[in-house]
Image (cartoon, rainbow, N blue to C red):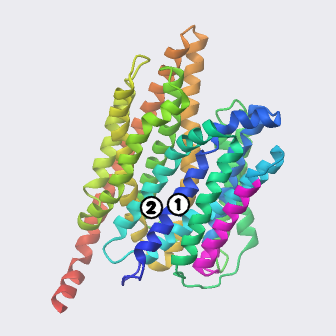
Amino acid sequence: MSSTPIRNAAAVLFTVAFATLLATFNETFLNVALTPIMADFGIDAGTVQWVTTAYMLAAAVMVPVTGFLYRSVPTKRLLIVALALLLAGTVAGAFAPSFPALLAGRIVQALGTGMIVPIGMNLTLAVAPQGKLGTYMGVVSAMTTLGPAFGPIVAGAVLAAGSWHMLFAVFGVLVVACLIAAVAFVPDAAELTNPKLDLASTVLVGLALIGILYGISTAFSGATAIAAIALVAGVGCLVGFVARQRVVPEPLIDLRPFSNRGFVCGLLVIVIALMTVFSMNMILPLFMQGSLGFSALDAAMTLLPACVLSCVLAPVAGKVYDRFGLRLMLPAGLALMTAFGFALSTCTEQAGSLQIVAFYAPVIIGCALSMGPAQSFALSSLKPELYPHGVTVVSTSFQIAGCLGSSLFVGVLSGVQAASLAQGADAAVATAGGFQTACLVAVALGAAGFCLSLALGRIERKRRAKNAPAAKAAAQAL
């Protein structure tokens, strides 16, 4: 965060928000096209899911590498490279003649999107004027909510008029527009320290993320043994990575942020909020289609108003944070998530769309009210020289939370649903029962987040009390 306003800070924020929207939009926009892709290439569901799984793994691996690149490559050039990779993968996907070619295009896309989120967060810290970090973070966090929600809706509309190749063409036009904005507005904001890349650390963190995320994503698919092996291998590599960071002169990721209690508590709140928002966007459509008879597009459109409202309120939450701190927005947001998550758990196969919206909107709004303040407080708890490392950790948590949340919530829904069907329950009733149980998991997470918000409030009060004498002296000097 800069101590003095940077010229064109608003234009930089627009570019960062646009790029973040594209990165998160890209995670979900191809999901509704999996069926026609299977038909075109003659592949089964187990094969086509690699379009999503490989994308997620490649994006996750790029996040810690980007932390190193941010301190080695001028910021403008780095963001342009990230967007160029995203564009190259998009073009490859649009003209893919075979499934391997499509998969390669998605992996190239993921290399770009894995870079965009940490670059954007670092830029936000660098250009946010004094006292406006919460507002700027609120705008960026709103894009992480809007992107995944808009993906299936836009894709459904495009598929109604053309083939899945058209999805890549439309997305490519948006990437070109963002690339032009990056060339025009983004400054070289980072202080380059030219660190040396430790190859062993890079390999270890890559294997750790691949093992953990792949294990999580397959844990509920029936391949329990494979998931367990992947998780054990991933955790083993993670332990090795942590041990190596303590002995190498220039660690890939400085682990000192984890010694800061405010950062750790804020990070946990971010993970809880992200798990909830990503998972609700998956289990609610499954419930509405499986129990209520909605079409995929109708289900997406039902959720859209709440997502748009949450995006409008996220910057407002940031402004409140800038003025009053997190003691108001954070507990309120997590209380909304918990209370209305419980309300959603009461929905049955007789629920209507208005009831769904009335209960879902406060949950997603609560996520929006929590994300910006939690990110702002966690990162502002660090010393400026640790910002890139803190951003790397937070950005990596985005991938882990999305994977963990979707696997956990969908796994719970599917497990309860399968058990009910085995007992002879109607399909609609079975799906509703799985949805209700998954919502109760969200309630437990929300309650844990609420307790963390109270702990963060105490940390904030102690920080304010500690800084009060210096602030008073500065005011008297003016």
Name the kind of residue labelled 1 in the image.
Thr
Using residue 354 as the reference point, say whether residue 422 is left or right of it.
Answer: right
Q: Which mark is residue 140?
A: 2
Q: Residue furthest front?
A: 161
Q: Which residues are magenta?
A: 69-92
Q: Residue at x 49, y 15 (%)?
A: 429
Image spot of residue 281 (x, y percent): 50, 39
Q: Does residue 381 show up?
A: no
Using residue 134 as the reference point, say whether residue 386 is left or right of it.
Answer: right
Image spot of residue 342 (x, y percent): 36, 31
Query: Total number of numbered labels?
Result: 2
Q: Which residue is mark 1?
A: 20
Q: Which mark is residue 406?
A: none
Give the quarter of the image for residue 43. Answer: top right
Q: CA distance from mark 2 to mark 1?
A: 7 Å
| Quadrant into which the C terminus falls | bottom left
| Sequence order check, earlier mark of 2 and 1 | 1
Q: Residue at x 59, y 45 (%)?
A: 28
Q: Is residue 310 magenta-colored?
A: no
Looking at the picture, does residue 55 appear above or below residue 1? Answer: above
| Quadrant into which the N terminus falls | bottom left
Q: Few, some or many C-alpha atoms within 10 Å of disc 2 (few <14, some 14-19, many ≥20)? A: many
Name the kind of residue labelled 2 in the image.
Val
Q: Nearer the viewer, residue 147 or 396?
A: 147
Image spot of residue 119 (x, y percent): 56, 69
Q: Is residue 86 magenta-colored?
A: yes
Q: Nearer the viewer, residue 463 or 11?
A: 11
Image spot of residue 185 (x, y percent): 51, 77
Looking at the picture, does residue 290 appear above or below residue 244? Answer: above
Using residue 30 as the reference point, say whether residue 329 is left or right of it.
Answer: left
Q: Secondary structure at mark 2?
A: helix
